[in-house]
Image: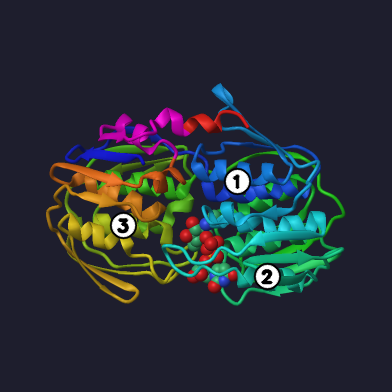
Amino acid sequence: MDKFVIRGGNPLLGTVRVSGAKNAALPAMAAALLTEEPVILENVPQVRDIETTRKLLSSMGAEVELGYGRAQHRTTICCRNLARPEASYELVKTMRASTLVLGSLVARCGRARVSLPGGCAIGARPIDLHIKGLERLGAHITQEHGYVEANASRLRGAEVVFDKITVTGTEDVLMAATLADGETIMQNCAREPEVADLADLLNKMGANIEGAGTSTIRVKGVSKLNGARHRICPDRIEAGTFILAAALTGGDLNVSGCEPHHLDALLHKLTEVGVKTAHNGDSVRVLGSGDLKASDVVTEEYPGFPTDMQAQYMALATQAEGTSIITENIFENRFMHALELVRMGANIKMEGRRAIVRGKTPLSAAAVLASDLRASASLVLAALVADGETIIDRVYHIDRGYEHIEEKLRGVGAQIRRIGEMLPKKVAAPLVRA
Ligand code: UD1
């Protein structure tokens, strides 16, 4: 199993480029199931979750071609023949977003069989809201042997009101509604940029969607969708991680290829913390002063402060003067990284959904364990300012969602290397061709 070895102390200097958003690429790949024609996606990040989705689509009979060389971020998917509209437990257990295929499969094939995801490191994460939404569209849904089975000869447009805001739930029902008879009005939808990016792709495929990116989405169903070419939006969480890394190390970093507007909540928070940022076109420049002030954070749905940045912010808070209270509102168990940060010298107390971080305490290198994707990023950030050489185990979590993070960080001055059975090139190798 791979590990990262990181020696702290270097400020991040120079320019780092952001990849396409994993959380936009995953639903985009699921959207390809809605048509017989090829869907060409550009700016797809080379991360493990994309490879898992490729396997998932291929297992159903789809042809998935991942680009190579200069076109390494292009993925072409053709779902002309879908022999087996099924997502097995083996795949869903490694990537919960596999449940995103439920809506598109039932809309296209009239049936779908998808494993229930079960619990994960950050909480229960049920899919009841996906199921309820699809039932509103007329799908008949049963659960047996750990699988959800959905059947519908034809979906019907309906009003769907989500009891709680869900990102992939919104995307799942949205995809299904594109091929339903009549109009669907979805209320209390997730407003994340990745939902808008998916709607953008679906509209290029011939769907009729209005309002994506707001809490009400209207979809006029069409009988058939066509192929399309689409560029995946930049990864705001990867961009935010680099921005925090620069702030934490007192660096001067240009984070390029991002959409600064998607980072508003984070950039606003950084002003309170005492970090100067400026944006110009698709770049954000971060000027860390090494003098950070504590500030509280509450995670919320977009456009609020993202739960996917909470762990990385906690690493920053350990180096800010004063007490920062971090409240996690989205997931019930998303503080696994806190215990590892404490092992590195942080002063953090947990009280239910709140973590109280008292700073600043010097961090010292230790052997630590990555527990989930964003928790791993938090440990990388802490290691960049720790005294000595930190070893982070189980970095396969970080490979799920960050494209070659060690190469990108090394390019801007970090001392980080990967050790283990699998070298970085080999991580990329299965992605080269389907
Ligand atoms: C997506 C993101 C993930 C991010 C999360 C919250 C993808 C692939 N993943 O995950 O990175 O951390 O949004 O921004 O885009 N819930 C239910 N029932 C449901 C669905 C969700 O109770 O049917 C609850 C969840 O347990 C959670 C909350 O709703 O407490 C929000 O979850 P949701 O927005 O669905 O997260 P994901 O879409 O799984």
Residue underneath mark 3: 313
Q: Is residue 47 visible?
A: yes
Residue underneath mark 2: 144
**Sequence-wise, which precedes: disc 2 or disc 1?**
1
Residue underneath mark 1: 53
| Residue 151 place in picture, x, y as percent | 79, 65
Q: CA distance from mark 3 to mark 1?
A: 29 Å
Task: Tell me the mark number nearer the camera, choosing from 2 and 1.
Answer: 2
Label 1 SS? helix
Q: Give the magenta-colored segment's residue range.
A: 403-427
- Residue at the spot 29% in from the left edge and 67% down from the top edge: 296
Q: Nearer the viewer, residue 393 or 176?
A: 393
| Residue 398 place in picture, x, y as percent | 40, 46
Q: Does the magenta segment cover residue 196?
A: no
Q: Does the magenta segment cover residue 413?
A: yes
Q: Is mark 1 within 8 Å of ligand 1?
A: no
Label 2 SS? strand
| Residue 1 place in picture, x, y as percent | 36, 41
Q: Amino acid at mark 1?
A: Thr
**Sequence-wise, which precedes: disc 2 or disc 3?**
2
Q: Amino acid at mark 3?
A: Tyr
Label 3 SS? helix
| Residue 325 place in picture, x, y as percent | 27, 70
Q: Quadrant of residue 115?
A: bottom right
| Left or right placement of residue 376 versus residue 131 in this view | left
Q: Is mark 3 within 8 Å of ligand 1?
A: no
Q: Amino acid at mark 2?
A: Glu
Q: Residues within 10 Å of mark 1 (few under 14, many from 20)?
A: many
Q: CA distance from mark 2 to mark 1?
A: 24 Å
Q: Nearer the viewer, residue 338 or 141?
A: 141
Q: Is residue 249 visible?
A: no
